[in-house]
Amino acid sequence: MTNNKKDKYNLKEIEERWKKYWEEKQIYKFDSNSTKPLYVVDTPPPYVSADHLHAGHIMSYSQAEFVVRFKRMCGFNVYYPMGFDDNGLPTERFVEKKYKVDKSKITRSKFIKLCLKETKEGSKTYKKLWNDLGISVDWSKTYSTIDPVATRLSQWSLIDLYKKGALYRSENPIMWCTSCQTALAQADLEDQETKSKMNYINFKTTDGENLTIATTRPELLPACVALYTSPKDLRYKNLVGKEAIVPLFKHKIPIKESCAVDPEKGTGLMMVCTWGDQEDLEKWRVDKLSTRVLFTKDGKLNELGKTYCGLTVLRARDKIIKSLKEEGNFLKEEKIVHTLNVHERCGTPIEFFPSKQWFIKTTDLKKTWLTYGKKLNWYPKNRKKDYDLWVKSLKWDWCISRQRYYGVPLPVWYCSGCEEPVFAKIKDLPVNPIEDKPPFKKCPKCKGGEFFPEKDVMDTWTTSSLTPLIIKELIKKEKIKSEIFPATLRPNAFEIIRTWDFYTIVKSHYHFGKLPFRDVMISGHGLDEGGKKLGKRWGNYIPSNQLVEEYGADPIRYWATGAKLGQNLRFSFDEIKKGKKTVIKLLNVARFLEMNLEEYVLGKCKLRYEYVDIWILNEFNKALGMSTTAFKNYNYSKVRDAIDGFFWSRFTDYYIELVKYRLRGENETSANTAKYVLFTIFKEIIKIYAPILPFITEELYQNIYRKTEKLESIHLSDWPIKIVHRSSLDVMDFDQVIQAINEIRGYKSENGMSLGTRLEKYKLKEKVNLKKYGELIQNATRIKEIW
RNA sequence: GGUCGCUUAGCUCAGCUGGUUAGAGCGUUCGAUUCACAUUCGAGAGGUCACAGGUUCGAGUCCUGUAGCGACCACCA
């Protein structure tokens, strides 16, 4: 292959050209003055710290964008802003890693500076990628979840929730990440399969009786506060009410019974420790056992651990087991694999602490959340179950305070006398309590005069759950601003149903009592060619910028149409190649048109439809109907199937071949009619492809149709409507022509002839109405006489 | 353990409310062509639709069960 030949189609150059053009002409700019119906897209603000963009990101954003382009063509005034979630833990962790800094050893302001710097860098990377991909965002409408607009809204939201009684502060057992050193919410957890050991340990009652308990966490022994047995368990009936002695640590603990204990598990005798796991917490609440804390916030044992003080969890575990063995109270161990709750951002197993945190009420309104879930339009429908399941499994209220630096500050101060929280005045927002003064000089409650600021920041989701409101704030014109909320479409991947979607609904309920968006469109994951989830952890992907650089945006977008809504999609070079083939085929058809239509002037000649014209018009209308319906249901993969099928197997395989002879023939009307149909249908074909392949379709539109169509871009044109032809020609039986053509092509091929070979005569095996179609078949196959 | 999903040609997947010989793309084999086509076109091979029951005149399509895979949730003494 020579370089010359390669240059014949410079797809890269085409994409660069139109990318610039769209930006210059502001093709995707939102028009506040438009009277068209609004279509508001509340698109997920990606984490700017993501330095690991891959085909999965391309996939999910492209899929939503197909719909955006379709809606724009359907006459909606599409509002498609883009945000960046640069707030919170992911950014902090990214900065810590990149600059090798430790949050606790750097000043707060220096750390935030680094975060802001990375935030800027990250959003640049994203913007470039989205532009290269042809994502049709209005770049004059962007936000970041740390900017003043988002900060003010987040703080307003908390104050409003507080007034409404949905926000409270309390000392609760909270989930704690000892690595990130912050409180976490239930949604921040992830399961991780872990190899571990079940340890059997001997306790003694004060009477000297031996008891065996089983545990995976012997390091909790110093915090052991009780043993529990089931009331149904006859083995331990006589023990209830007695006391046991904890090995090594020698403190006495009561033996109690509870229905929550399952006699089948372990030895049937359960040890309860303060802050061991969830079960322990339940017990602690019920029986008001000791609240002693065993761990420090960075995951080490404290003084309660006595000689093991200062050891990390795992080291303490080993040492305690060793000591137990020496003491003779270690009976045996069994290897097991169990699932641990770990922090999804860093993989550290969580610990529990009693701590004062801010919470938003979620658990007592499960029915309300389910009702909202029902009212929402889910695409695909079955993803609603993910939401329902999550709501039903909620155990804790949403803990929103984080002991971190980089985030939206909680707008609150506390009275040093009575600890009464004092919130900022709404007109003063945004505030930073560390730098700003509280709105009162004296505490409204105890009349004391000293305040100390809250140092915590909000959970990232506290802000991103407000995106439908943030995007509203980007609009100045009051009239249209009021219509931005609720949004029309919320597109997102399924793993954030339980966070982004759920929390947004929670907030919208408390603030306004309604749904924050009408439709939710769920996309799947990108998988590698072997079917494994794409992820930084396994490095099983090509970076997204490299992908676009190498294969071009249109072919990759073509691949992204492959997944059924809500389903995962394997990465496939073959599919990308197929996309590229389609792009090239479109280019070639265009070339063919240009070669034949030069002298053709639209609208000036007489038309007389022939059978084949009516057939292709009908076929087109069918494909258009299928595409439109599919698109309305957010089913882009069916759209591609429909238009691909029509374009390849009808238009190029048959129609073009069947009219070639007319184009060069002497019958002017016949030639002009064929040209007219070719010209018209191809225009509609590229319009249907436009949402999927925005670059090549723009190129062809500008080259061929711009003169007659006037609009600055194909992406501003209307979605095609059915082509009306008012012809009475009956083509119900046109299939026989296709059959006949296939038969003749087969015959020629088998007999070593080229398809263009002229033949004197041929006898058809297929039954064909030759009176009706004979001439067409003869001309199209270059056979003088067919019978 | 619970919930959901998947299991259709070598590969990746379509198959709507059950209806004649089960489809596409890629791959493969054979052939033609370079006439808009970094080609394109034709022909062929290739499937007991995971398994076992059931409903039905009729099931890839509905029901029940089983197995494998995957995701989420829970438990984990």
Image: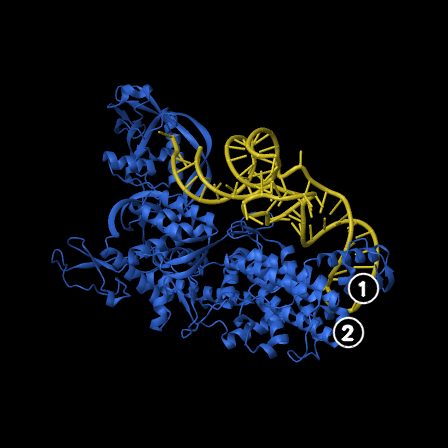
Chain colours: A blue, B yellow
Up the image or down, A604 lies above or below A386; here it is below
In the shown orientation, is residue A719 left or right of residue A734?
left
In the shown orientation, is residue A428 left or right of residue A691?
left
Q: Are marks 1 and 2 on the same chain?
A: yes
Residue A137 on image: x %, y %: 48, 67
Assign the N terminus of chain A to one quadrant of the image: bottom right
Instruction: Say which of A759 and A357 sits in front.
Output: A759
Q: Look at 24% across and 56% down and name the residue there.
A: A162
Residue A238 on image: x %, y %: 27, 19
Label 1 amino acid?
A: Gln
Q: Look at 29% across and 61% down and name the residue there.
A: A155
Q: Chain of mark 2?
A: A
Per the image, label 1 sits on a secondary structure element best described as: helix
Instruction: Say which of A481 and A309 sits in front.
Output: A481
Which residue is denoted by mark 1 in the rendering? A778
Q: Is residue A765 visible?
A: yes
Residue A5 on image: x %, y %: 73, 69
Up the image or down, A536 lies above or below A224; here it is below
Mark 1 and mark 2: span between their CA atoms? 15 Å
Assign the C terminus of chain A to one quadrant of the image: bottom right
In the shown orientation, is residue A402 left or right of residue A542?
left
Of pointers 1 and 2, the one earlier in the residue sequence: 2
Instruction: Say which of A241 and A628 sits in front.
Output: A628
- Decide: few, some or many residues near mark 1? Use Cα within 10 Å; few <14, some 14-19, many ≥20: many
Q: Which mark is in front, 1 or 2?
A: 1
Please tell me the numbered disc located at residue A206: none
- Decide: few, some or many residues near mark 2? Use Cα within 10 Å; few <14, some 14-19, many ≥20: few
Which residue is denoted by mark 2 in the rendering? A664
